[in-house]
Image: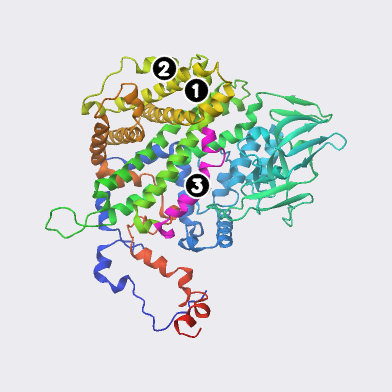
Amino acid sequence: MDKKVSKNKTVLTNKSFPQFSEAHGSVSARRVNPDLLEERQKCDFDQQELTKIFYGSSYMNHKKYQKIINDNPTLHGNPDYYDMDRNQQMIHAMKVVEASGKTEIIEVEKDYYFKSELSIAEYLQGQVPFAISFSMFNLVVTNLSLPDQRVYWRELLTNRRIMGCYAQTELGHGSNVAALETTATFDKETDQFIINSPTLTSAKFWPGELGKFANYTALCARLIIDGNDYGVQFFIVQIRDKETHETLPGIDAGDIGPKIGYNSKDNGFIIFKNVRIPRTNMMMKYCRVDREGKMELDGDPRLLYSVMLGIRVWIMISAWMYLGQSVLIAGRYSVVRRQFNTLDSDKKIERKLLDYQSHQFKIIPAIAQVVVQNLARNHINNIYQAYILDLEKGSDNFKPLKVIHHLVSGLKANYTQNSYETMSKLRESCGGAGYLSSSGLPSLIQEYAAQVTYEGDNTVMLQQSARYIIDGVSKNKKYKEDALTYLNDLPQQFLNLPVINKHQDLSKLESVLDALRVRSAFFIHKTINDGMKIQKSKMSKAKLINEVFQQDQIILSNYHLAYYSVWSSCHFLEKNKDSMKCTNLKSHLIDLIHIYGLMELTKDSSILYSCGYFKAGHATLIQETLKQLINKLRPQTISIIESFDISDQQITSSIGNQYGDIAETILDQARNSKLNQNELAPGFKEHILPILQGKL
């Protein structure tokens, strides 16, 4: 659009302020802000070693994705994205995907199995087409199909000949998968399944890429044979014509409309009426139906939920990166934004935000959260990947499924909830600048908001995670997993407790880990052994779990998961102590885990007073220890944050760029706002100017 502004309008650029230009960062001039440069020069550890720890086995793909994006400007984040309407954002996403198809990413995708590793979608702006196709649809095809089915569908998928979505959630049911209503009825005469949406509430609602983009769906539907209901199974269903992309007969589908975030994603609805598919379109790895309609199960029926489990693993292991982007923006801003001169000094220069202790308590604990979520994920992810590998080799050992579900469901809820809340606090820490869309923070928060809900509502996930502990402890089960053995003898965890009465004790990570374990053990013991077991004679188990002790389950899970996260992070450091070369890096990671544990105790340590582990005054000791650790890490803040290795093309922020430019870029993007393309606001001349001119 051509600008329609007055020829007499004064426009001042950074060149109008030569003194300003010399002292501050500039993206256009490729000049780093001296304050940011000063922070980088304080680094005392090997940043590349830390980056490799963060990305693990995905490090090479991470660098490959970065190079592909850096070499192709169309894939760069676009500041104008924040001022686009929904249609424009979707067109932008389609152009990005089109451009990516002309790069080496095509070769990477051919071998992509979505085994919880990073995909190119995490590096691109907004929500792009094919993301669901290569994740959830891919998981169904990879994990639930027979070998010949797998080859057929993956060839179409990885060559981008089809775009698939994952249709599970319905208007009436989401987390309760067993109650889904969509049906797939076998017709013996034609050797086909007939797909129907029998009720209004059975309409599939929410699947990404269903609204406009996908031409196939991995459908979750009830298997019906001769009137018998065999529960939920998966079917591949074509929903749009390959040539015209119009919906096929018997299908009513569309987009569900605007949302809080994900507005470049076409989350959709679909209703089926007598849609026929070949029998061979049923995913038959664990459940097979032959030509005569005979059904045969092979393995634990719960394996059908492995797709959801795989997505939850991905949500859990990627939480650190999404939070890390927010930390990077807020952290860089905090060292180039100066405010007030509050110290007795002859210098009139204002202080950096990060030099204030209160601001350090906003940024550095958030870094600790990123680090713990990253390190802790390795333990459960290794268990999950080993389990999936065994299944692929034909193993019939399904025992690990319970503990995997317990930890993955709980951590998905715990990490996404904590990340979402911390991202909001980080936005607030940037003041008015963080409220600007151009900062990138509002968009990050809006996009991430979905993760506390999809693939299992967080409240439901925490309750499901708690059930594993409730069932085991109430039956005196012996837990074999290292992180869970403390559950075998709960009273022993808080009898003959050491009384922490010296500051030096809390300055040890081992003491904090011990406190988190005792907090979890005591609450679990009080809830199950002193609560449920005593009252079970008065009411049913269902009522105890779903009414009387429902909220206790959420607290129980969060206490347990906090302990597990610190334990798992320490486990990672111990396991890799010989391969980690930088001594300072080891020290910083220990301090960050320590901070995470202490911050967890500041949320709620009342249980530790109840059981006698803490005495009067320990809350002060926690706070003083935090002050010492946070002050110690202050000089390394930017160096740790920038070890996340997140490029400007990925975050697209006017206040978090690598040059520390928080003035020139903000003004440039403000001037380029759509509202400023004309001198007068739309409708102003017709509705407001006559009032000001007294003509009404």
Asked whether residue 542 is in view, the answer is yes
Given residues 594 and 24, the one toward you in this image is 594
Callout 1, which amino acid? Answer: Ile
The x and y percentages for residue 108 are 55, 45
The x and y percentages for residue 335 are 28, 53
Asked whether residue 385 is in view, the answer is no
Task: Tell me the crowding category of disc 1: few under 14, some 14 to 19, or many 20 or more residues within 10 angstroms, Cα based.
Answer: many
Task: Give the structural element (helix, strand or loop) at label 3.
Answer: helix
Residue 513 horizontal side relative to residue 168, left or right: left
Given residues 56 and 696, the one toward you in this image is 696
Distance Cα–Cα, label 1 vs label 3 = 28 Å
Residue under circle 1? 469
**Up-down: is 251 above or below 687?**
above
Q: Mark 1 near mark 3, Cβ–Cβ under 8 Å?
A: no
Q: Which mark is residue 449?
A: 3
Residue under circle 2? 490
Q: Which residues are magenta?
A: 435-461
Q: Mark 2 near mark 3, Cβ–Cβ under 8 Å?
A: no
Task: Give the structural element (helix, strand or loop) at label 1.
Answer: helix
The secondary structure making up most of the magenta span is: helix
